[in-house]
């Protein structure tokens, strides 16, 4: 995953740097420009504001006395006291020096660079990817990055690492980097660079290791839900739930409140390995209870962030209803699965016959459609959308040149619903869901004829029961 920053392009010039330019400049119109020192003489990033609102991040450069910022250029002069500048027929006043004092260079002092990197909050110039935090994970030279939008919602997760004087952030490798009192600046081999504002010191997150503190790690893993943010689509929500036991369960992945995937997760105490689906992880860390990091054998880190929109309830096997498939439990099976369920856009429904042992499995998709003028439009289904005519020949329906269907006289089990019927079924499904999810105690009686009867008792747990007596009258 590429780390989301504003990427700027360097230009090369041989002239010596004019350090008097470095600083924050403002004119009478309310425009402001921050000119920051880069890695080459007379070139660096320029942050442009209008009435203190960010308008663009660009590159500034100087050649033969001409200052160029993006596509704007002109001869500049700076006053003797270095506090005033004339450029493009306007006067600019220095309002801040943006000092590069206390500079820490990655190549010269790697240890202090990493200490500074992970001790402070940094800020980009994007509303979607603003607050940026660097955390260490399995060593002092690698970790994860969390980025948050202006509403403090998680917007990006990525990995970082340093070695041999370079730093890798997400998929980008930067060959030089430095941290000053005000900024983090890094440049790659194509002369593209990133610039982040340095903020206040941040809280250091407590590390909980899967191997060393298994119970605490797994407790956090199975609590609430985890987010995988996405830039171009909806975020994914992952729920780790214990199913077979406290060390094995399912990862249920949702997007837009729809189940999109289900995988088995399992932890092996004997080897210390954690597995999701077919992927093995040899280490795991929980950072402050809000970041989860799993380490693959190839060194890749899989990072999740704790959702603040879902109750952080911790789940155990006592929250799971386990029903073994058996003819004796056919009634209970019917209660559990004869409800509309779904995965992605496909609905599933088990229809039982009167014997409660057989029936029909229905799976289908529903797409809203609209006829407007001479156009048939089906939402999220383009099979019929190019049809200009509909033809009927024998028992075949022809939808223009798009597709065809055969009128089917076989027995079917589903029928269309009116709006009121659909709403009533939705309300009934909600009621069924609440009933299935509620905790209660049932008395199961196995009869000699092979059948069984289940009686719902008016208590929620065995703790409320003092004794049970069977009385024959």
Image: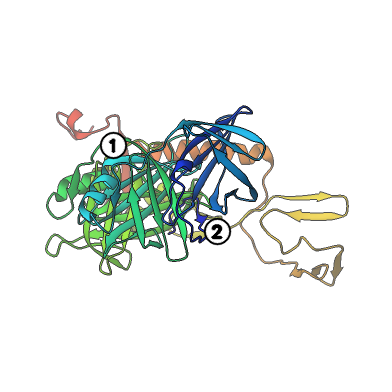
Q: Which residue is mark 1?
A: 202
Q: Position of residue 171 (x, y in %)?
A: 41, 62
Q: Which residue is mark 2?
A: 362
Mark 1–mark 2 CB contact (< 8 Å): no
Q: Secondary structure at mark 2?
A: strand
Q: Position of residue 95 (x, y in %)?
A: 48, 29
**304, above or below 269, in the image:** above
Determine crowd level at label 2: few under 14, some 14-19, many 20+ residues with C-alpha closer than 10 A.
some
The colour scheme is: rainbow
Position of 365 with respect to 263 (left or right) is right
Determine crowd level at label 1: few under 14, some 14-19, many 20+ residues with C-alpha closer than 10 A.
few
Residue nearer the viewer, 30 or 194 = 30
Q: Is residue 449 visible?
A: no
Q: Position of residue 402 (x, y in %)?
A: 77, 69
Q: Residue furthest front?
A: 80
Position of 374 with respect to 411 (left or right) is right
Residue 49 position by quadrant: top right
């Amino acid at each position: 995953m590429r780390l989301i920053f504003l990427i700027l392009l360097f230009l090369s010039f041989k002239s010596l740097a004019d350090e008097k330019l470095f600083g924050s400049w403002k004119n009478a119109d309310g425009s402001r420009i921050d000119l920051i020192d880069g890695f080459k003489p007379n070139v660096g990033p320029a942050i442009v504001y209008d009435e203190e609102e960010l308008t663009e991040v660009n590159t500034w450069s100087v050649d033969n006395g001409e200052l160029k910022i993006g596509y704007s250029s002109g001869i500049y002069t700076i006053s003797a006291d270095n506090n005033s500048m004339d450029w493009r027929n306007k006067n600019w006043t220095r309002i801040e020096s943006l000092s590069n004092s206390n500079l820490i260079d990655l190549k010269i002092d790697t240890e202090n660079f990493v200490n500074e990197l992970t001790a402070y909050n940094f800020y980009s110039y994007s509303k979607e990817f603003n607050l940026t935090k660097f955390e260490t994970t399995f060593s002092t030279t690698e970790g994860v990055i969390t980025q948050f939008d202006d509403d403090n919602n998680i917007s990006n997760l990525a990995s970082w690492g340093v070695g041999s004087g370079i730093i890798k952030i997400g998929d980008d490798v930067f060959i030089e980097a430095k941290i000053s009192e005000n900024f983090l600046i890094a440049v790659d081999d194509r002369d593209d660079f990133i610039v982040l504002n340095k903020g206040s010191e941040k809280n250091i997150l407590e590390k909980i290791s899967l191997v060393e503190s298994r119970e605490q790690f797994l407790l956090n893993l199975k609590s609430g839900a985890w987010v995988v943010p996405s830039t171009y689509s909806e975020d994914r929500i992952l729920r780790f739930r214990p199913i077979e036991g406290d060390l094995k369960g399912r990862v249920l992945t949702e997007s837009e409140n729809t189940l999109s995937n289900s995988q088995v997760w399992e932890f092996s105490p004997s080897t210390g390995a954690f597995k999701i689906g077919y992927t093995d992880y040899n280490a795991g860390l929980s950072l402050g209870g809000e970041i989860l990091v799993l380490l693959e054998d190839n060194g890749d880190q899989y990072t999740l962030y704790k959702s603040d929109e879902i109750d952080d309830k911790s789940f155990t096997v006592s929250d799971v209803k386990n029903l073994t498939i058996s003819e004796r439990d056919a009634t209970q099976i019917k209660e559990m699965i004869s409800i509309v369920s779904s995965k992605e856009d496909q609905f599933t429904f088990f229809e039982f016959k009167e014997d409660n042992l057989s029936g029909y499995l229905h799976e289908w998709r529903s797409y809203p459609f609209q006829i407007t003028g001479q156009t048939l439009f089906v939402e999220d289904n383009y099979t019929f959308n190019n049809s200009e005519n509909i033809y009927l020949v024998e028992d075949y329906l022809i939808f223009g040149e798009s597709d065809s269907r055969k009128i089917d006289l076989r027995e079917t089990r589903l029928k269309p619903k009116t709006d009121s019927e659909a709403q009533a079924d939705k309300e009934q499904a909600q009621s069924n869901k609440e009933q299935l999810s509620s905790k209660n105690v049932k008395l199961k009686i196995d009869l000699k004829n092979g059948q069984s009867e289940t009686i719902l008792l008016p208590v929620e747990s065995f703790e409320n029961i003092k004794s049970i007596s069977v009385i024959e009258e």
